[in-house]
């Protein structure tokens, strides 16, 4: 049990930092930038800040997979990520077809990462049902 606490603890710490940075960056960008504002280096930098936080979240997941020494625990986390990727591909592909052939609201690409994160929860539920454990969640 101790072997898995360290990697998960570090993962949670990194994810919490990334989540706080993401929320703060979204708040700053939303309060500062206006959709009709001209492009400027400052606007680009502010718009990219949340993306840096997303990269930190992805780095945190990658580090967890690297730091987990137990192959079973690593497999559980990989399955969650694969299921999340499948959910994301399914939702965005089907919605893209709806956009192409019907009149539905446009799905902003901004939503792809949150959909993937929701897919992690789906993956955890699938792991819980099929393996008896959800992994970290």
Image: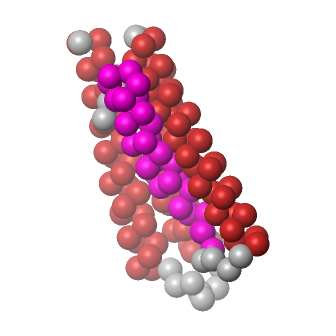
Q: Is residue 9 above or below residue 52?
A: above
Q: Position of residue 53 (x, y in %)?
A: 46, 51
When the figure is inspected, residue 133 is found, relative to residue 34, above or below; the finding is above
Of residues 8 and 53, the one drawn nearer to the viewer in this rendering: 8
Residue at image coords 39%, 42%: 121
Q: Quadrant of residue 122?
A: top left
The answer to whether residue 64 is seen in the rendering is no
Magenta segment: 106-134
> Residue 134 at what x, y percent from top left?
34, 29
Estimate the x, y position of residue 65 in percent, counting from the top left. 47, 23
Q: Quadrant of the C terminus?
A: top left
Q: Is residue 116 magenta?
A: yes
Q: Which colour assignment does the render follow? A: secondary structure
Comparing 136 with 44, the one in front is: 136
- 95 horizontally vs 118: left or right: right
Residue positioned 59% across, 41% down in the render: 86
Q: Position of residue 6 (x, y in %)?
A: 28, 20
Quadrant (top left, top right, bottom left, bottom right) of the N terminus: top left
Residue at (32% x, 22% y) in the render: 132
Label the magenta part by its dominant secondary structure. helix
Give whichever of 48, 1 is nearer the camera.
1
Considering depth in this image, is 92 or 13 the residue closer to the camera? 92
């Amino acid at each position: 049990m101790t072997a898995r606490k360290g990697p998960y603890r570090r993962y949670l710490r990194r994810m919490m930092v990334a989540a706080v940075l993401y929320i703060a960056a979204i708040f700053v960008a939303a309060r500062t930038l206006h959709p009709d504002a001209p492009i400027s280096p400052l606007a680009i930098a502010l718009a990219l800040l949340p993306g840096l936080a997303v990269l930190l979240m992805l780095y945190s997941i990658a580090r967890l997979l690297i730091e987990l020494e137990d192959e079973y625990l690593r497999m559980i986390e990989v399955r969650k990520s694969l299921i999340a990727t499948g959910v994301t591909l399914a939702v965005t592909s089907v919605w893209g077809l709806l956009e192409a052939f019907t009149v539905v609201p446009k799905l902003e690409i901004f939503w792809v990462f949150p959909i993937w994160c929701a897919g992690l929860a789906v993956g955890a539920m699938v792991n819980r049902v099929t393996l008896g454990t959800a992994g970290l969640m």
